[in-house]
Amino acid sequence: MTFDLFDNLDDPGPPPEPLADGAMVLRGIARANAETLLADVHAVTAAAPWRHMITPGGLQMSVAMTNCGHAGWVSDKRGYRYDPIDPLSGQPWPAMPVSFRELAITAAGQAGFPGFAPDACLINRYEPGTRLSLHQDRDERDFNAPIVSVSLGLPAIFLFGGMRRADRPQRVRLAHGDVVVWGGPSRLAFHGVAPLADGDHPLLGRLRINLTFRKAL
Ligand code: SIN
Ligand code: FE2
């Protein structure tokens, strides 16, 4: 047990919690910088507002999304893709904030993926009751880079499955500041988020915000 009397930056924190080969949870590593991260989310959404994308099947997603970085993940009737232009504004996506990039690189390094160079960050906003069904992140060009996923605000149950959709997923509670990294043999693992339980978070109220960093291009 340590007390953070000195807010020790060298404190390695709890060890990574393995989920599968190449996948782990880094508990609380985004907590200390959460207010900066959220101010930067706010700045991104001023230029690239939250929107509910349409799936290729024509359904509106319950989770609100936006992006920053060189490319943004978009879904519409034509399919899923990374696009350097925000279709809503007709402008490039906002640049990836330094606070985001530094966290993503640090997390990837701690998880055993040095040299991560994220060029895209999808930002998801969950309200109580919203969910993300099981899927693989496979629209990126290069699967050598991991996915880094940062949880802020209300806790969620993250579903972490296997290589087949039918594999029963692990249910992992992710709290404010927790980061999940999956890469290597887990890079194409199915994953999703169970319907968000209601709550009241000191920084985000009734919301959960998730940042996922990818090397898309
Ligand atoms: C995602 O799969 O893109 C997001 C996962 C999450 O919100 O935890
Ligand atoms: Fe995903």
Image: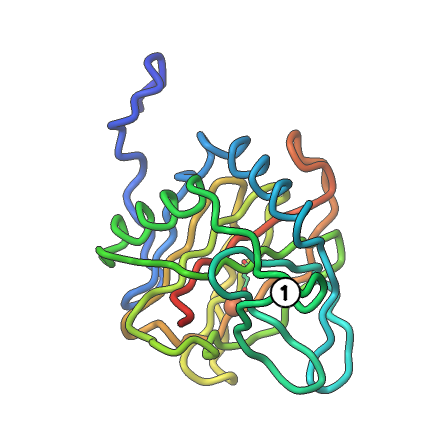
Towards the viewer: 170 or 31 = 31
Residue 106, how many percent across, how many down?
A: 31, 45
Residue 54, how many percent across, how many down?
A: 73, 75
Residue at coordinates 43% horizontally, 75% vertically from top-left?
Answer: 140
| Left/right of residue 21 with respect to residue 46 in the rendered view | left
Q: Quadrant of residue 99?
A: top left
Q: Is residue 70 above or below residue 167?
A: above
| Left/right of residue 34 with respect to residue 10 in the rendered view | right
Q: Is residue 101 above or below residue 22?
A: above
Q: Quadrant of residue 75?
A: bottom right
Which image quarter is the N terminus in?
top left
Q: Which residue is mark 1?
A: 86
Callout 1: helix, strand or loop?
Answer: loop
Q: Is residue 124 above or below residue 14?
A: below
Q: Amino acid at mark 1?
A: Asp
Circle 1 packing at 10 Å, graded few (<14), some (14-19), many (20+), is: many
Towards the viewer: 81 or 10 = 81
| Left/right of residue 121 with respect to residue 15 in the rendered view | right
Which image quarter is the C terminus in?
bottom left
Towards the viewer: 214 or 98 = 98
